[in-house]
Image (cartoon, coloured by chain):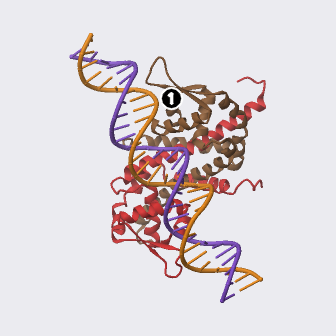
Chain colours: A red, B brown, C orange, D purple
Amino acid sequence: MTATQPTTTDAENLLRLEHQVCFALHNATRAFGAVYRDALKDLGLTYPQYLAMMALWEHDELSVKRLGELLRLDSGTLSPLLKRLESAGLVKRERSALDERSVLVSVTAAGTALRERATDVPLTVAARTGLDREGMSELRTLLDRLTDRLDAGPAQEC
Amino acid sequence: MTATQPTTTDAENLLRLEHQVCFALHNATRAFGAVYRDALKDLGLTYPQYLAMMALWEHDELSVKRLGELLRLDSGTLSPLLKRLESAGLVKRERSALDERSVLVSVTAAGTALRERATDVPLTVAARTGLDREGMSELRTLLDRLTDRLDAGPAQEC
DNA sequence: TACTATTGAGTTGTGCGCAACTGAATTGTG
DNA sequence: CACAATTCAGTTGCGCACAACTCAATAGTA
């Protein structure tokens, strides 16, 4: 409120606002997590597991590396996650014959069957966001641009 | 592209888009995490620890419950986090005399000293977002509204 | 005043996310 | 061909997030 040090005040507002952007992002992600947890509990899936299944439903067979590129996750996260999906009977893992280093992940019959039961999950969640198609698209574009800039590293400067 | 089943196609687009909103959110949060990890590593803080310190720097003394309300975290997350901050010497914890159930958390001299070294963290991170004040404010508003709607539960329907 | 219900912190167990590492398979290069 | 460098999965260790629980302190009530 005091006008004695306007520059400092401006900087502090910027900092506070910045803090709140990341914090708001953090909170929105966790709120989404709670909604998905509720929507997915009947299927016995967590949200990251659901993401992996979506990618596999779409592509049928993927290497761990390719799946990691799609989900932006490394093997340290994916290996145990896929192990859990496998022991749940939703997914099969086998070494590639062409390149013994890579492991190919594919959907089992039970995994395909689960897809049917998962059809209304996105609808339920979408309804909860209160966003229409345009609102989602707008927000997604904003977030993707933000992620790209954050990933780009400090060497951009333009 | 085919116009044979426009309704199904519309629905699928909606679902896909919806999926991408949460996924985009997830990715943006993790990208922010990487930036903060880098910016905070000299201070020896994680991002959630940094959030807790920011709240404590601002309020000086807070109960675990109040801190949890500010950060949207429960004791299951906060107790071990505060324990780590305490063993790092940044924070002091003591039972309230008025209500022996609650624990009051306050900043030590070392914690206050750390604040000085943390001043440029938000500036660094803000620069990396590539957003100006208006862009941040806009995004934050969108995210806060989204979080509120997601928190509200399925009983809204309007 | 007793007795029940609630509140506040903490603990345990599970899963995600990431850094750092291991080990085997493959690729590249002399 | 031999040997170093790279690639791919997996493992370990740490911290966060959350559910479900315990336990003590307090508040509410018959």
Q: Is residue A126 visible?
A: yes
At a point 34% along the width and 64% down the height, the residue shown is A114
Q: Is residue A64 above or below residue A127?
A: below
Q: Residue at x 66, y 44 (%)?
A: B40
The answer to whether D23 appears left or right of A99 in the picture is left
Pinpoint the chain carrying mark 1. B
Would you place residue B47 above or below residue A116 in this image? above
State which quarter of the image contains the C terminus of chain A.
Answer: bottom right
Residue at x 77%, y 53% (from the top left corner): A157
Q: Give the residue type at disc 1.
A: Arg
Q: Position of residue B113 (x, y in %)?
A: 70, 31
Q: Position of residue A17 (x, y in %)?
A: 65, 38
Q: Nearer the viewer, residue A66 or B158?
A: A66
Task: Determine if residue A134 is in view.
Answer: no
Which residue: 73% across, 23% down?
A2
Of the 4 image quadrants, the one containing the N terminus of chain A is top right
| Residue position for label 1 | B66
Q: Does A15 sit left or right of A64 as displayed?
A: right
Few, some or many C-alpha atoms within 10 Å of disc 1 (few <14, some 14-19, many ≥20)? some
**C24 or B118: which is nearer to us?**
C24
Q: Is residue A157 above or below residue B116?
A: below
In x, y percent, where is residue B102? 46, 25
